[in-house]
Amino acid sequence: MAAREYFWPNMHMEIAGAAEDVYYHTLVFEVAGDYLHVAQPEAGFLPEDGARVKGRFVLGEALYSFSTTVEGRTWSEGEPLLILRRPSRLVRNQRRDYYRYPVILEAEYTLGGGDGDDQWVEAYTLDLGGGGMRLATDERLQEGTELKLRLYLPLQKAEPPELLETAGKIIRSFPLRAKEDKYVYAIQFTRIKEAQRDKIIGFIFALLRRRIR
């Protein structure tokens, strides 16, 4: 997709190193021909001149992503700016692409059938998307294990979280997180209603819009 008309002054977006998963908020100060002058992220992201970076921004119901190069640095009104080459192409990720967002939410799981006699184990999410999540728990589990899941989704600030019950399978395990003394698992949803998936995706995109504004 051609990208030239998708960048403008005061536009909010996020950038990251080409091989990194942590994004940093920035603001477009100026669109100068083939270059974007963007604010130096406050979190200390300092890519070198010539480094490849990737970026993303939300527009409407889609997440747009791009890759580009750091061309140098400049100043404007006393503020340090990065000079990025203006991307020539964008990738439009529809809501159904199940973008994952890092978010900590209360969760529970059980290895049983999900009826009233099952023992539910407390856990929490590390990220969440329409297709699955990463789950942190005290319990050591095997890849391939099927789980019944409860997610507590805070859809409205002034109301209690909404309970979503679904099912998933562990597709990957990660090393023990020493500081938290937790085991971490990548979970793929194996049974989820489309209405539930829509609520998760809507929640994630609402968080992303607030972050990039």
Image (cartoon, grey):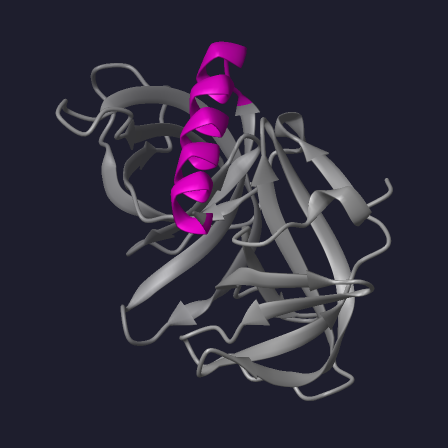
Q: Decide whether residue 1 is among the magenta residues.
A: no
Question: Considering the image in quadrants, where does the N terminus appear?
Answer: top right
- Residue 168 as seen in the image, left or right of residue 35: left
Q: Is residue 115 visible?
A: yes
- Residue 97 as seen in the image, left or right of residue 195: right
Instruction: Please determine whether, in this image, residue 61 is positioned above or below residue 40.
Output: above
The residue depicted at 29 percent of the width and 42 percent of the height is 105
Tell me where residue 175 appears, x and y as whole percent: 48, 69
In the foreground, 41 or 205: 41
Q: Is residue 47 visible?
A: no
- Residue 11 as seen in the image, left or right of residue 43: right
Q: Residue furthest front?
A: 77
Q: Main secondary structure of the magenta part?
A: helix
Q: Residue furthest bottom?
A: 48
The residue depicted at 80 percent of the width and 46 percent of the height is 3
Tell me where residue 80 appears, x and y as whole percent: 51, 82
Instruction: Please determine whether, in this image, residue 204 is positioned above or below residue 136.
Output: above
In the foreground, 111 or 22: 22
- Count of marks placed on residues: 0
The residue depicted at 58 percent of the width and 54 percent of the height is 9
The residue depicted at 25 percent of the width and 21 percent of the height is 162
Q: Which residues are magenta?
A: 191-212
Instruction: Please determine whether, in this image, residue 16 is positioned above or below residue 120.
Output: below
Q: Decide whether residue 194 is among the magenta residues.
A: yes
Tell me where residue 187 appears, x and y as whole percent: 52, 41
Q: Quadrant of residue 155?
A: top left
In the foreground, 116 or 100: 100
Tell me where residue 13 appears, x and y as whole percent: 55, 54
Instruction: Please determine whether, in this image, residue 8 is positioned above or below residue 204.
Output: below
Q: Quadrant of residue 28?
A: bottom right
